[in-house]
Image (cartoon, grey):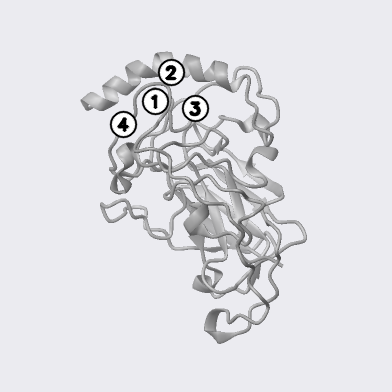
Amino acid sequence: MNADHARKQVLGLAGAALLSALLGCSSNPKDAPVAAGMGGEPNEVGGTGPRPAGGSAGSSSGGSETGGGDATAAGGDATGVGGTDAGAGGAAAPEILQTPAYASSVESFDPGAGAGFNQAKLPGIVLGPPKGKGSGSGSLDVVSLGAGGEIVLGFGDLHIVDGPGPDFVVFENAFWPGGDPTQVFAELGEVSVSEDGQSWQTFPCDSAGDGHGNFNGCAGVTPTLVYDASQLVPLDPKQSGGDAFDLAELGLQRVRFVKIHDLETQPPGGTTTGFDLDAVGAIHAK
């Protein structure tokens, strides 16, 4: 145990009590009432908070995990993608919705060891747009999957479709301690997609990383920024943050379900272990 880790454990005794009180009076419109006894806080100081994945370092002090300051994204209007744009392989992309498209259902949730944070707020807490806080702070508007936990989200009658570039974004509460993106504070998830909810294809994920904060193909790496979901249509990962995925990488044209599986990059601890899911949004949907 290094000095920073020891200091975080000491600070956690006070931090956990403070956050428990704050969570009891959340004003987040996406949340249901907080269940009694639901303690701990993802990506906050203290013994129940997650630690940097893949050997990444960094610590936070005080009652929140502020680092180099929140990076906020401009919310201005974004032009939608038309039906004549070229998709993967030169094929014409389908018509794209001009309204926000986020997951609308939780099809299944199989929590792993150390899950529990905000579980009582399912399904609403992971549906609709994310509640990002920027690159310097991790949101508490999340559900912790636990070590090896898994969740499946659906888009109702909508499909995520293959268009130009990335097609959907997975939002977690990763952040940059001290504003250093090479030391990203992340708990990694593997992402799979399906058309029927039965047959799945999985995006390759480099959970070992390159030592510089890059974990190609994994979710839970890129901080979720602050943006206006009603204006950022279609989604632009450069303005929204989150980890973007392209169906063309798997040779798929359309899917309806997204599955996230925690890769157990951190040992179980408290009720905030594992991938902390905020939301899943479609860039190209029909």
Please name the amino acid that badge 4 sits on: Ser
Instruction: Return the residue at label 4.
Output: 59
Task: Kindly check if marks 4 and 1 are in contact, taking CB atoms under 8 A apart as contact.
Answer: yes
Secondary structure at badge 3 equals loop
Position of residue 281 measured from the top left corner of the image (x, y, whole percent) = 61, 55
Mark pair 4, 1: CA separation: 8 Å
Q: Disc 1 designates what residue?
A: 45
Distance (Cα) linking label 1 and label 2: 7 Å
Residue drawn at (62%, 74%) of the image: 253
Q: Which numbered disc flags the more N-terminal residue, 1 or 2?
A: 2
Tell whether label 3 touches label 2 (CB within 8 Å): yes
Number of the label disc, if any, that sits on residue 242:
none
**Is tag 4's residue or tag 1's residue first in the polypeptide sequence?**
1
Confirm or deny contact between disc 2 and disc 4 (CB under 8 A): no
Residue, x 49% and y 27% (percent of image)? Answer: 41
- What whole-number distance in Å separates the C-alpha atoms at marks 2 and 3? 9 Å
Query: As drawn, which residue projects farthest toward the bottom?
Result: 90
Amino acid type at image mark 2 = Gly
In the rendered picture of this protein, how many numbered marks are placed on residues?
A: 4
- Do the residues under discs 1 and 2 have CB atoms within 8 angstroms? yes
Identify the residue at the far right of this view: 157
**As shown in the figure, which amino acid type bears the numbered disc 3?**
Glu
Among numbered discs 2 and 4, the one appearing first in the sequence: 2
Q: Which residue is mark 2?
A: 15
- Name the quadrant containing residue 154: bottom right
Q: Position of residue 164 (x, y in %)?
A: 55, 74
Amino acid at circle 1: Val
Q: Going 63% across and 50% down the picture, which residue do you hit? A: 229
Q: Are marks 1 and 3 in contact (CB under 8 Å)?
A: no
Q: Which residue is mark 3?
A: 41
